[in-house]
Image (tube, rainbow, N blue to C red):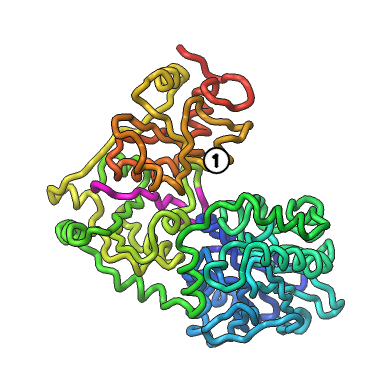
Amino acid sequence: MDPTKSTVTEDGLRVDTYYLECLAQASYLVAHEGQAFLIDPRRDIEIYVKALADQKLTLKGILETHLHADFVSGHMELLNQYGCPIMIGRNAGAKFPHYSAMDGDCLALSSRYSIRALETPGHTFGCVTWVLYDNTSNKPLKAFTGDTLFVGGCGRPDLVGALIEGATPEKLSQQMFHSLHHKLLPLGDDVEVFPAHGPGSPCGKGISQELSSTIGNEKRTNPALQFSKEADFVAFNTDGLDQAPQYFPNAVKTNLTGASHLDAEVAAIPHLDPIAFNEALKANDEVIVLDTRGATAFASGHVQGATNIPLGEGGGVKLNYEDGNFAIWVGTLIKPGITVLLITAVGKETEALQRLGRIGYAAQVKGVLQGGMAAWRDSGLPTQSYERFVMKDAAVATQLQNDPSTVVVDARTAGEFTCAVRGHFIGAINLPLAEMPKSATVLDKSKHYVVYCLGGFRSTIATSILRQHGLDAVDIVDGYDRGVLGNARCHTTAQGTCTKTAA
């Protein structure tokens, strides 16, 4: 995989950004004069191995901005392969071999450039920003801010409270205020900002679509930097935080000690023929069948009780309209440690396991269906199916609204549901996907449920969960933006005029 973005200066200073849209996660390769540092590497390290070899670089060290909660880091695999040191903040509590970084620690990148540690607690106690300096002028050029400063936001303060005594959101927000105003802003307006996450990450709110920025631009536009009083910032930073995905504490614990080798973990997972797969399913009362095929394939035939979280077609690097944050939703809806049996499209088995491994879930998979659903059907095993709903015009929308036996479900967040710009389908009830397993237990089984989200990704997951609970549910093809707004806008609360009329 090529870098998402590369910048090279006239003297050869190179910064490669590797961004995973599926996890909204960025890692960085910083190189000059044949020497390189890796910052916040993900678990599947092949992309870095290839880049180092192709560019003939010597890896001098692995720099972690903090112990990550949303993905499993690749620092131990890189250490084992290259023997280079891992640097992480002195207050991170890391239990793997490392050097504890503190303010002012300086790492030589080349004859001209160095990288210095700047302790910036607030997201966690141990956060460090790694700042690239030009030694000839002693000026900072680029700040790799981790989860401290995002483009358009800052790191949330509530992810480590259950793991670390005294780590209250209020205390961490106080530290964040100090880190932002007394550590990062003084670096100077021209310093470039390279954060660990982009839009869609659960690690912050209001994160911009842009993957990099400058201190000056953030000072002008970032809501988190508009507070002069600490108390006002603390109130802002602790307000409106969505529930964190349930896998976060386990990912932190894994990163504390370092993960096992991903390739070996994936290779050890058995591929089961349909009969053996079915026996494994029947032998365990608490098992999740995770079907990663697309919504249409799932609707046309699936194993009873399966959860459909589509893998998508972009490998997690790019998300198409109908794609979503696969790994994040797996970790949000499936308990850490529970047995998972995996179904994929044929040829997607390794990709699915690798992407589950990025959040520490590959080890939970106790079997992969060999031959996919075609083999399952050929073995005479039962399937379930349903017909997806097409909102083809306003007349169909009218019928839907006038049917007392049908309930339209909006699986978006409460904020999306109440947003005046896009609005929602008139008469719909809001059941956010993150809460769907709980919501499904109290719904009326005599009703028919038609489910939508923004683009169709969350609604197919929600539909599969509702069907697990014995509810008659289908999802709307193309989601709200294209399926509902595009064809039946006059049946929504969206601002603007109706673009489609009943025939």
Residue at image coords 50%, 33%: 480
Q: Residues within 10 Å of mark 1 (few under 14, many from 20)?
A: few
Instruction: From the top left corner, tell me how far across and down residue 186 is, in percent.
Output: 84, 67
Of residues 22 and 443, the one nearer the viewer is 443
Instruction: From the top left corner, tell me how far across and down residue 433 is, in percent.
Output: 45, 45
Instruction: Residue under label 1, please give it.
Output: 414
Q: Is residue 499 left or right of residue 268?
A: right
Of residues 217 and 241, the one nearer the viewer is 241
> Residue pushed farthest right?
137
Q: Is residue 132 left or right of residue 70?
A: right
Range of magenta residues = 303-319
Residue at image coords 78%, 80%: 112
Residue at image coords 52%, 84%: 96
**Residue 135 picture quarter:** bottom right
Q: In what element is the residue under mark 1?
A: helix
Which amino acid type is marked by label 1? Ala
Q: Above or below — where is 435 with respect to 86?
A: above
Q: Above or below — where is 75 with respect to 324?
A: below
**Quarter of the image that includes the C terminus:** top left
Number of numbered labels in the structure image: 1
Q: Is residue 318 magenta?
A: yes
Q: Main secondary structure of the magenta part?
A: loop
Instruction: From the top left corner, tell me how far across and down residue 457 is, in percent.
Output: 44, 44
**Residue 447 picture quarter:** top left
Q: Is residue 99 visible?
A: yes
Residue at image coords 52%, 57%: 244
